[in-house]
Image (cartoon, helix red, strand yellow):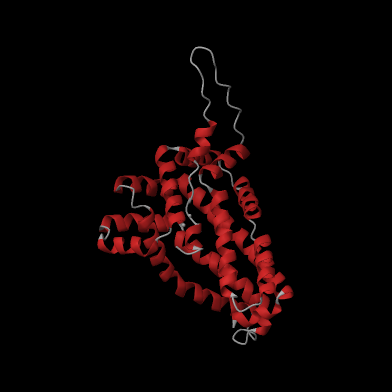
Amino acid sequence: MARGSAFVALVGAMLASSAIAAAATVEHDRGSRVAAPAAPRTDARAIDELLDRSGLKVQLESLTAGIRAQFLRAHQRQSGQDRITINRIVAERFAAESLYTKIRLEFQRNREPGRLREAFAWYDSPLGKRITGQELAAHVAGGGPDAVADLERNRPSPSRLDLVERLDGGGGVSETTVDVTVAIVRSLTVAFQPGLPAVAGLSRDQLERQVARARNRTLEDMRRLCLVNMLLAYRGLSDDELEQYVQFVESDAGQWYVSVMNSALLAAIAAAADATAAELATAVPQLVGDLR
């Protein structure tokens, strides 16, 4: 899914790993070669294979690159040296490998072998691989004005819209996208609060209420944007294929995967955002001028 903008692309299983499965196939001559027996699959190995199939590592690389770009675009007024400092801090704190390690640990803590096997079976299936492949292609290519114009000319049917809305709801796409964005904004606001006149005098509870209101105002706009992006990403799927995807996401195994992934991603991002904001407040205190 993080499923567009740097944040819209982050939730949903974004990237294909069919090449991994192909590379793991043991080729043999029927007359003389015998495939080596597979090693017993431990829970830890099964989790690694699931996360490989769902493309998490590459998705996180894209996400962290997008976050760095967002920070730099937001602080274009800073000097060149300050921008180098900002980029270094953000790159270190939002390192994809660090985020991956935290998410993997949450899957280990919340492992359910039966649902783990079912989720892996989906991502390892031909349709699962093709869908994540299309998600990757859409993510790399982006929506673009031509694709959006094509969507306007060929409006989706009500049944198609219903499937995409179910996918958004079942996968927590809009909700998690907004929550990731809010986590970063909250961390920056707290770290620089004394220098921000609009919030300097607020208690932590008052600040949290303001953040919650901003989140709710943003959610509907984000939901519309996510729906457009998903309609574009899944143009190559028939309604029946999209229905199968939705059924997986809504299944017990799919909900286990989505719940652990989204909560783990959000926790990892929030921790990285807190550390980033605290370090920026010390290293680049003049940044407060961009936040007003």
In this view of the protein, which residue sits in the foreground, 12 or 23? Answer: 23
Residue at position x 52%, y 29% in the image? 25
Residue at x-position 41% and y-position 70%: 221
Position of residue 45 measured from the top left corner of the image (x, y, whole percent):
61, 37
Q: Quadrant of residue 210?
A: bottom right
Numbered marks: total: 0
User: Left of 291 or right of it: where is 278?
Assistant: right
Q: Position of residue 190 (x, y in %)?
A: 65, 76
Residue 247, compared with residue 208, is above or below; it is above
In this rendering, does residue 251 appear at all?
no
List x then y, in percent, for residue 207.
60, 79
87 to 233, vertically: above or below: below
Q: Residue furthest top?
A: 31
Work out which residue is located at the far front of the displayed protein and give it: 80
Asked if residue 240 lies left or right of residue 114, the reply is left
Where is the C terminus found, in terms of image quarters?
A: bottom right
Q: Position of residue 171 (x, y in %)?
A: 45, 55
Q: Nearer the viewer, residue 181 or 282?
A: 282
Nearest the viewer among 135 and 245 is 135
